[in-house]
Image (cartoon, rainbow, N blue to C red):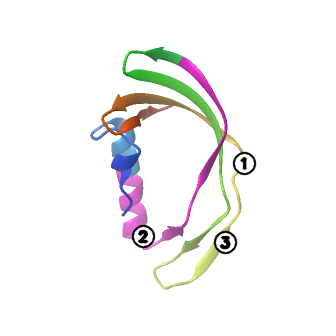
């Protein structure tokens, strides 16, 4: 399972949501192979001390999903998405605390 701590603040809503998503994928036996999100635009909405809010536009790149039986399914790139990230500065750098 991926290390969501490299992206999310431990114990935060973002961390809980990402951990739950990975657990569902693990339980289903489905494994995305090299999934990648590409940020196409980012706008700082607010900054204050050790926190920031950033609006990002992104796409999930084309990738392959591998089922428990080894069958492979090609997944095309997603349409553009937009989310607002609540970020927190940590000893390891900026981490996601919440997503709206």
Residue 42 shown in magenta: yes
Mark 3 or mark 2, earlier in chain: 2
Q: Which mark is residue 28?
A: 2
Give the Cα distance between marks 1 and 3. 16 Å
> Of helix, strand and loop, which one carries label 2?
helix
Mark 1 surroundings within 10 Å by alpha-carbon count, few (fewer than 14), some (14 through 19), many (20 or more): few
Residue 41 quadrant: top right
Residue 97 shown in magenta: no
Mark 2 or mark 1, earlier in chain: 2
Name the foreground residue: 77 vs 52.
Answer: 52
Give the Cα distance between marks 3 and 2. 17 Å
Q: Which residue is mark 3?
A: 74
> Of helix, strand and loop, which one carries label 1?
loop
Mark 3 surroundings within 10 Å by alpha-carbon count, few (fewer than 14), some (14 through 19), many (20 or more): few
Range covered by the magenta-colored residues: 19-45
Q: Position of residue 73 (x, y in %)?
A: 63, 75
Q: Which mark is residue 79?
A: 1
């Amino acid at each position: 399972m991926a290390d969501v701590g490299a992206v999310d603040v431990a114990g935060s809503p973002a961390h809980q949501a990402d951990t739950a998503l990975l657990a569902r994928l693990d339980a289903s036996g489905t494994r995305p192979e090299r999934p990648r999100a590409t940020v196409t635009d980012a706008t700082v909405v607010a900054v204050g001390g050790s926190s920031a809010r950033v609006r990002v536009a992104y796409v999930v790149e084309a990738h392959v999903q591998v089922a428990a039986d080894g069958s492979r399914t090609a997944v095309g790139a997603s349409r553009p998405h937009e989310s607002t990230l609540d970020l927190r500065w940590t000893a390891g750098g900026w981490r996601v605390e919440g997503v709206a």
